[in-house]
Amino acid sequence: MIKKILSITSFVLGMAIAGQGQTVQDIFGKTNYTITWYGIDYSHSKIVGSVATFGGSTPISAADLRDNYYAAWNYLILDEPDKFDIAKMIHHKTVEKDISITKKLNAAAHMDSIEVAATPYYSPQEIQSFVSAYPIENKTGIGLVFITESMNKLKSEAYYHVVFFNATTKEVLLQERFRGGAAGMRIRNYWAGSYFSVMEYVKDSSYSKWRKKYAPNTPDPTTPTW
């Protein structure tokens, strides 16, 4: 019995150490840490201007936005993985996906103050506070989430914070704010175009800059070793 208890304790301690020891360098290269996509968090998103005109010629309410489109934009990434390739975006061979947490957050988003007159700008401290409040339990590895800051129909643009964090401690490891241009037919595809443009920019430009800055001696994990 004592041996069994000791082995369980060692396992738990090992998991704790593995979960807490992550650094920004662990995002890059061939590591043992699993990266999990937690989806797009719209719970802090603002609409610049009027929600009534957000959908263009299609009438829309704040409730429609929360109850229908927040979920639709998240499921589109799961339904069309070849186009919205999260693993390719961050130059990894595989990425796990679990949008249950952002699904809950988005469904419970408060919509009474969603309209704003100007584009907000969330600070790194605010982003950390959002992540710290995520109802994540018994998770290890590195989390990846897009935190939507705002959407502006007049300028056809949206702003997202791309955030990597320690799934165990919820410490933000890396975050950067991006502008995404909206494009496409109908509301769902139009605004999906904004986060797709961010994904493409991360894949083609930002990832290599991050790796050069934070892990300069780490080879790209998708590069063959032969």
Image (cartoon, grey):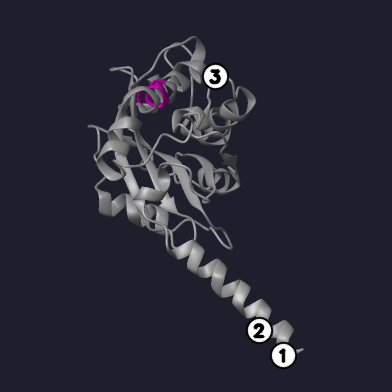
> Which stretch is magenta?
197-201
Q: Secondary structure at mark 1?
A: helix
Question: Quick one: label 3, few (<14), some, or many (20+) residues within 10 Å?
Answer: few
Residue 56 spot, x, y in % from top left: 42, 14
Q: Which mark is residue 6?
A: 2
Disc with the residue nearer the chain's start (3 vs 2): 2
Rounded to the nearest whole Å, what is the CA distance between mark 3 and mark 2? 47 Å
Nearest to N terminus: mark 3 or mark 1: 1
Instruction: Tell me if I can see residue 48 in this picture.
Output: no
Name the amino acid, label 2.
Answer: Leu
From the top left corner, tell me how far across and down residue 221 is, in percent: 47, 36
Check contact, mark 3 vs mark 1: CB within 8 A: no
Q: Nearer the viewer, residue 222 or 82?
A: 222
Say which residue label 3 marks.
83
The kind of residue on which mark 3 rests is Lys
Judge depth for marks 3 and 1 and give the one in front.
Answer: 1
Residue 97: image x %, image y %?
59, 40
